[in-house]
Image: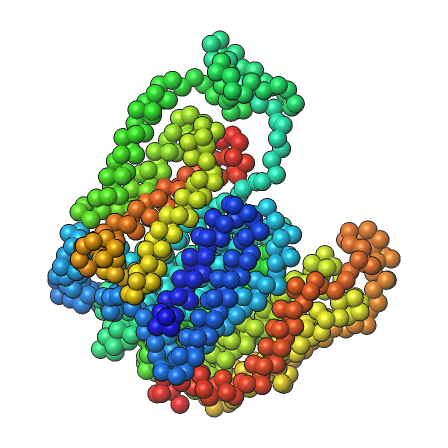
Amino acid sequence: MSAHFPGLVIIIPLVAAFLILIGALLDKRLAFPLTALALLGSLVTAIGLLARVMQVGVVEYHLAGWAPPVGIAYRVDHLNGLVLVAVAAVAFINLLGTRPLVVEAFGDRLGPFYTLYILLVAGLLGIVVTGDAFNLYVLLEIAALTGYALVGMGEGRAPLASLNYIFMGTVGASFYLLGVGYLYLVTGTLNMADLAVRLPALYPSKVVFSAFVICLAGLCLKMGFFPLHAWLPNAYSYAPDPVSSLVAPLMTKVMVYVMVRIMLFVFTPAFAFDLTAISEPMVWMAIVAIVAGSFLALSTRRLKRMLTYIVVAEVGYMVGGFWLGNRLGISGAILHIINDAVMTLCVFLAAAALIARTGSDAIDDMQGLFKKMPVTMAVFVIAGLSIIGVPPTCGFFSKWYLISGAIAAGQYGFMAALLLSSLINLVLFFRIFEIAYFEPFEDHHAEHPTGHGRVLSAVQEAPLELLVPLVVTAALLFALGIYAGDIVSLIIDKAIPLGIV
Amino acid sequence: MKTFALITVLLLGGLLFYGTPDFPDWGDPASPASLHVSPYYIEHAVEDTAVPNIVTAVLADYRGYDTMFETAVIFSAGIACLFLLRVYRRKSARTRLYRHNLTGVTLRIAKGGKLPEGSAEFERIDSVWVPYDMIIKVTSRLIVPFVQLFALYVIAHGHHSPGGGFQGGVIFGAAIILYALSNDLRRAFRRLSEKAALLASAAGVLIYVGTGLLCLLLGGNFLDYSMLAEMLHTDAIMARSHGILIVEIGVGLAVMAVMVSLYYNLSSAGRHDEGL
C-alpha cells in the first residue's frame, strides 16, 4: 500500500469531500468526524511518505499507470515531502481547534463548509505533491476556488474582499498558466522533470524568458509579494476566523513552495540565478516587502489585520532568502516555509480564540486578558516570540539561516531588513503584551458600559477543544526550533540541488 | 492609478510581443509541441485504449487525473455557490399569489391565510407578475425530452465524436433549467429536488474518483482502468475504453447536477422559494 502513498495523500481527502456532503445530507453531525478522519489519514500518509523519501530517495507515482511525459506523474522528494507534512499537519490542527467556532458561525451549513475545507486542503496538498506543471494549475484552481468561497462568508466587507481576491487570484493563476503554455509551445511537454531536461538547449529562446517572467509574476501575485499584495490583508482579515487560520498559514507558503519548485526544478538554478539578472532585483524587492509589511503592521490597531501585514513581511523573508541563490539562503527560505506555517497558524488560532471570547479584534480592547485567558495569552506570547525570532523557538533558526545566507551573499541590505523587521515585530507584540498584561480590565468597561455589547465578566478562557491544539502548536514551535539543525541537515540539505553552494 | 495600470498593461503587452519572434510557425509539423508527446498519442491512442477519438483518450485516460480534478472544480463551484447563497432560515408565512386557472383571477393570500395547496383549480404563481404562457410551456415540454436524449447521446458518444461528459452534462442540465424556466422553480423541485441535485453532483464525481480507487484496490495505480478488465469481462485495452465511458457518465451526472444546483441558488437568491 505504501507504494500508493503519493496518490493516497490527495485521494483520501478528495473522496472524503463527497462523502462529507452526502453524509451531511443525512445528518449534519457526520461532517466534522468524517473531515477529521480524512485529514488524519492524509497526515499519516504524508508522514509515511516523508519517512519513505528519507529512506529510499525520490518516490514517483504514475497516475493511471502512464509513465511521464505521456501521463501525469507525482514526484515526491525531500522538498515536497517536508512541505506535505506541514500542510497536512496545519490543516488537521486547525480543523480540530476551530470546531466550536465553525459550529457557531456555520451551524446551518456544516456540510458545504467542511466539503470546501477539505477540498481546499486537497488542492494545496496536490499542488505540493505533483510533478506536472499543468496538473499543478488544475489543483491551484481547486484551492483558489474553495478559498474564495470560504473567505467570502466572513462578516462586513468580506464579500468585497473576496471579490478582489478572485480578480487578483485569477490574474495570478492565468499568468502561471500562460507561462506553462509558453513552455509547452517550445518543449512539447508538461512534466516538470522532462521540462528541466529539455529546457537547457532553449535557454537563449525569448519564449523561455517570457515564460519565466510571466510565471514568476503570476506566482508573486498569488503569494502576495509586496507590490502585488493588495488583495491579501483584506481577504485574510475579513475572512471568518476558522478560515483565516487555515488560508493565512498555508496559501502563501504553498505558493512560495511552488516558486522554489519551478525555479529550481523546472528552470534550474543555472537559468534562474545566473542567466537572468533577476536575483538582485528580487532580493531588493524582498527588502522593500519586508520593510513595508512591517511598517504597515505598525500602522494598524486591529489584531488580525496586523497579523496579515506580518504575513506580507514574512513572504518577503522567504522570497528574499530564496533569491540570495546560495545554499544557506535557500535552506533558510525552505525552513521558513515550515516554521512560518506553524507560527502563523499559532497566532491566528490564538487570535481566533481571543476574538471569539472578547468579541472584538481591536488591540485596545485586549486589556487584562492575561488574567482572563492565561493559557491562550501564553501561547500567543510564544508565537509572538517565535515571529520576533527569539531562541529556542523556531523563528530564530530560520532567521539565522536567512541572515547567514545574506552575509554569505554580501546582501547586507537584506540582513538589515531582517533585523529591522525583527525589531518592529518586537514593538508590535510587546505593545499587545503591555495592554493585555498591565492595563486593567475594569476601566474600559466602565467607560463603555454597553460599548461593544460584550460583558467583561463573561470573558473566560477559550474552550478546551481550542486550547489543546493551541498548546500543541506552541509546543511544535519549540520542537521545530530544537530540531531545526536536524531538519536542515537530514531533509532540506538533500532537497536543494547539489550545484548550489 | 490609471496611468500606473496603463504602464503595467503596456509592459505586459511588450513582454508578450518580445516572446513572439521565437514562436514556432503556425501549423509547423516540426514544432516541438508536435514532435514530443503528441506523436505518441496519435500513434498509440487506439492500440492503447481502443478509443478512436484521440482527444477523449488523452482527456480521460492519459491525463484523466487532470480531468477528474476539473470535475472537482465544477463540483466546488456548485458547493461554493450553495455555501454562499443558501438561506436556511426561511420566513414561512409570506404572502403568496395563486391563480384560479378557469377564470384567471389572481388571489393574494396574506400571512396565515388558508392556502389552496393541492387543489387542481388553483396554481401558485411567483409574486412578480406571471403571464399566461401556454405556448412556452407546451413548446418546452415537447423539446425537453429530445434535449435530454441528445445529451445522453453526447455523453455516450464521446469515444467517437466530439462530446463527452462535460458537454453532455451541460446539455442535460440545460434541459432541466429550461423546464424550470418555462414552468417555475417549485415544479422543477418536484422533478429534481435540491437534495437530489446535491447528491447527484457528489455521486457523479464520486463515480470518477471511485473508479480510480477501484483500480487502485485491484492492484494497479490510481485510475489505471486496465485493472477493471476482469470485472468487465474484457481485455485490458477494452477495459480502458469502458473505464473512460464510466468516468464520462460520472462527469455528466456531476456537471448536470451542478448546473441545476447553480440555477436553483442563483435564480432564487438562495431562498429556493420563488425564482425567475
Q: Residue at x 18, y 54 (%)?
A: B234
Instruction: Note whether B219 is above or below B56 in the view shown.
Output: below
The extreme top residue here reads B103
Q: Residue at x 47, y 13 (%)?
A: B101
Dividing the picture into quadrants, the one containing residue A441 is bottom right
Instruction: Note whether A39 is above or below A55 in the view shown.
Output: above
Residue A339: image location, x then y, percent: 54, 77
User: Does any portion of residue B55 appear in the rendered image?
Assistant: no
Dividing the picture into quadrants, the one containing residue B27 is bottom left
Q: Residue at x 20, y 53 (%)?
A: B233
Q: Along the line of sight, which residue is nearer the eye, B81 or B204? A: B204
Quarter of the image with the N terminus of chain A is bottom left
Quarter of the image with the C terminus of chain A is bottom left
Residue A420: image location, x then y, percent: 61, 80
Instruction: Note whether B205 is above or below A91 in the view shown.
Output: above
Q: Is residue B18 left or right of residue A35?
A: left
Q: Residue at x 57, y 62 (%)?
A: A95
